[in-house]
Image (tube, rainbow, N blue to C red):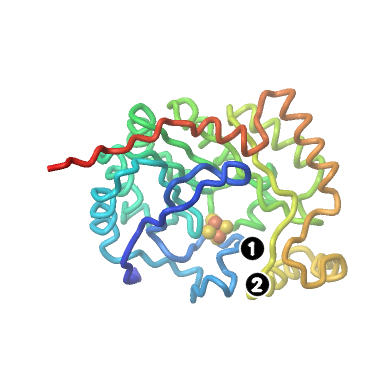
Amino acid sequence: MKEIEAKTILTKVKPSDEFWYHHDYNMNLYRGCSHGCIYCDSRSDCYHIENFDEVAVKKDALLLFEDELKRKRNKGIIGMGAMSDPYNPLEKQLEVTRGALLLIEKYGFSVSIATKSHLVLRDIDVLERIAKKSFAHVAITITTADDELQRRIEPRVSSSTIRFETIKALRKSGIHSGILMMPILPFINDTLENVDQMVKKAKESNAEYIYPFFGVTLRNNQRDYFFEKIDLLFPGTKERYIKTYKERYVCESTQSKQLYLALNTLCSQENIITNMKQINTLFKVPVSVEQMSLF
Ligand code: SF4
């Protein structure tokens, strides 16, 4: 197991309730991710992560984390999973994410996790307790309802079917949960059939929301990796990307208008939220601020 030096774990963030979840802090206990998603943005050059597929854990992560929690007066919502999946396969043995959740519970903070792994269910006991005291939310990324297609684009992580079941279990335990439906890859899973199946399964799993992006972003390094993979997995598709998007960063599906319309229509029929402002109404927990003692 590789360890990396770290000075801090928590980063203060300015919540943007319109486009992303209302988090007060972000944290990553691991660096890199072995789930192998062909479109992963965290591979991009700008993040300077060498050997991205090899997961490294931050040295003394929990000691650093506890020290930071003790000193924070604003007991806000801590986001996990922005740059690497907190439930990568190493977590099964290391239990660093679980340790962090226990500390979040101990110090009265709230938590919002993004993951693709059903391993999060191992920690449902802690999440339930946090949900009762303050607030707990788990976003599960699902980009296709088709397990066979999912295995090709996200090869080393729980199947889509298992991820829907994960949401169902979380919801049963009183934990907020919904679907991050992104990225949706042009010419691969940007179909009305996919939207239709996703909404059906979201409803069955009692997901509170689906937050979509019908497109993918491509940057240096990540673009090369993505093109290499789609060339092998979906012959002819790389050429369509080059012809349609050239070197563009945002590659929005050419079907995006129809897809957003279909998703919004189907979701409103099923009472599933699709916009971030509304999703963030679930996050409206009173933020507790400890009073500083004068003496
Ligand atoms: S799970 Fe997330 S961080 Fe890991 S490879 Fe997939 S997209 Fe990247």
Q: In which quarter of the view is residue 226 placed?
A: bottom right
- Residue depicted at 70% across the width and 24% down the height: 270
Rendered location of residue 37, percent (x, y): 60, 60
The residue under label 2 is 225
Rendered location of residue 161, percent (x, y): 60, 40
* Rendered position, 291 above or below 11: above
Identity, as a three-letter code, of the amino acid under mark 2: Tyr
Name the residue furthest front: 294
Q: Secondary structure at mark 2?
A: helix
Nearer-the-camera pick, 115 or 285: 285
Q: Is residue 156 visible?
A: no
Q: In which quarter of the view is residue 89 placed?
A: bottom left
Nearer-the-camera pick, 122 or 99: 99
Q: Ligand 1 shows up in which quadrant of the image? A: bottom right
Q: Secondary structure at mark 1?
A: loop
- Residue depicted at 62% across the width and 42% down the height: 18
